[in-house]
Image: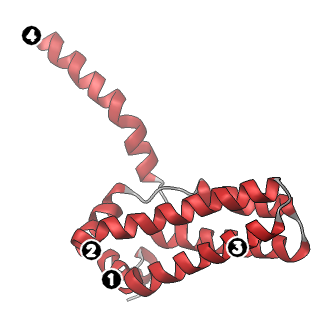
Amino acid sequence: MERKRLIQAIGLLLTLAPTVAMTGDAPSLKEIMQGLRNNLVEISDGLLTDDFEQVIRGATSIAEHPKIAPAQVQLVASALGPEMAAFKQLDTLVHDLSLEISASAKALDRDVAISSYQRMIEGCFDCHRTYKERVAAALGPEPEAQSER
């Protein structure tokens, strides 16, 4: 019986270890958003200079951005309640549009890339206008801001 519990504990540890390791170093939502802003600038610069490789890099980085740490997801979900589904839809919209931008840049279709980029920016603004204050309040001040007090 004791051996069975030991095996179960080891199994649980092996299952959770990657999650614990990943969340320990997970970037904050603010850091993720700053990275996404940089990716948007990269796409914009690429579109302005017809550098499709740059557009692809920026769009791919958005599509593959780090996930929000589970603890922060719980705080946001608590703050938004039933609106969490709409919040997630905006994230999905931005993700899907980043894939469209990347595909159109690979096809050298500047017009579709620009159209998708404009829709992405609108999605970002819609999300910020609707949720930014409440999400920021739910997450509280950044750790370095707390230590300055």
Q: Is residue 62 above or below residue 8?
A: below
Label 1: how many residues lie within 10 Å, few (<14), some (14-19) or many (20+)?
some
* Residue 28 in view here: no
Earlier sequence position, callout 2 versus callout 4: 4
Q: Position of residue 99 (x, y in %)?
A: 64, 56
Tell me what residue is drawn at x 28 percent, y 23 percent. Answer: 10
* Residue 116 in view here: yes
**Amino acid type shown at disc 3:** Ser
C-alpha separation, residue under disc 2 versus residue under disc 1:
8 Å
Q: Which mark is residue 80?
A: 2
**Amino acid type shown at disc 1:** Arg
Name the one closer to the observer, 60 or 18. 60
Secondary structure of residue under mark 2: helix
Q: Is residue 11 above or below residue 67?
A: above
Residue contact between numbered discs 3 and 2, judged by CB atoms under 8 Å: no
C-alpha separation, residue under disc 3 versus residue under disc 2:
30 Å
Badge 1 is on which residue? 134
Q: Position of residue 33 (x, y in %)?
A: 54, 72
Earlier sequence position, callout 1 versus callout 3: 3
Badge 3 is on which residue? 115
